[in-house]
Image: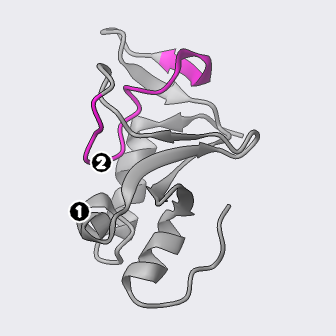
Amino acid sequence: MLPLTKRYLVLEAESYRGSGGVSAENRAQGFQPAFIDTSTGATYLSTFVDGRPAPFHLLDGMPDDLVVARDCRGRVAQVLGTIIAGFLREGVFYTREQAAALVCGKAALGTV
């Protein structure tokens, strides 16, 4: 699997804009931007490097053991390819597609 990059997060967010699958469109329904490691099932809230919750998907606060590469300033540039972006709500992880379905009033497709 290819590593998850900052650029991919931007492209992914653009593709889900208007569907409810981005933070700005689902925050009011209790969704928090997060990541899941599909190989372990561990979830991680999106945070700034100092640990404060981020209002959108950021790689900066990801644990060091998931980081594949950093940029010249030391910021996280890539994480493991088993990591996907989504949302946590009431302790349950939702993919962007699942969150969008809930926001639009459709039945959830099940969790990862």
Q: CA distance from mark 1 to mark 2?
A: 8 Å
Specify the segment rendered in magenta: 52-69
**Picture residue at 61% right of the left edge, 17% below the top:** 65
| Element assignment for label 2 | loop
The secondary structure making up most of the magenta span is: loop
- Crowding at label 2, few (<14), some or many (≥20) Cα neighbours within 10 Å? some
Residue 44 placement (x, y as % from top left): 51, 38
Mark 1 lies on a secondary structure that is: helix
Tell me, what colour scheme is on the image? Answer: one colour
Name the residue beneath numbered marker 1: 24
> Which amino acid type corresponds to the residue marked 1 in the rendered image?
Ala
- The quarter of the picture where residue 95 lies is bottom right
* Between discs 1 and 2, the one toward the N terminus: 1
* Mark linked to residue 2: none
Q: Residue 6's image quarter? A: top left
Q: Position of residue 18 (x, y in %)?
A: 28, 76
**Compared with residue 93, is residue 65 higher up or lower down, i.e. above or below?**
above
Please tell me which residue is depicted at 52% across the width and 18% down the height of the picture: 69
Furthest residue in direction bottom, as rendered: 106
- Crowd band around label 1 with a 10 angstrom C-alpha radius: few (<14), some (14–19), many (20+): some
Q: x, y percentage for residue 63? A: 52, 22
Residue 108 in magenta stretch: no
Q: Residue furthest right?
A: 39
- The answer to whether mark 1 and mark 2 are in CB contact below 8 A is yes
Residue at image point 55% right, 88% down: 107
In the picture of the structure, the residue carrying the numbered disc 2 is 56
Amino acid at circle 2: Phe
Q: Quadrant of the N terminus?
A: top right
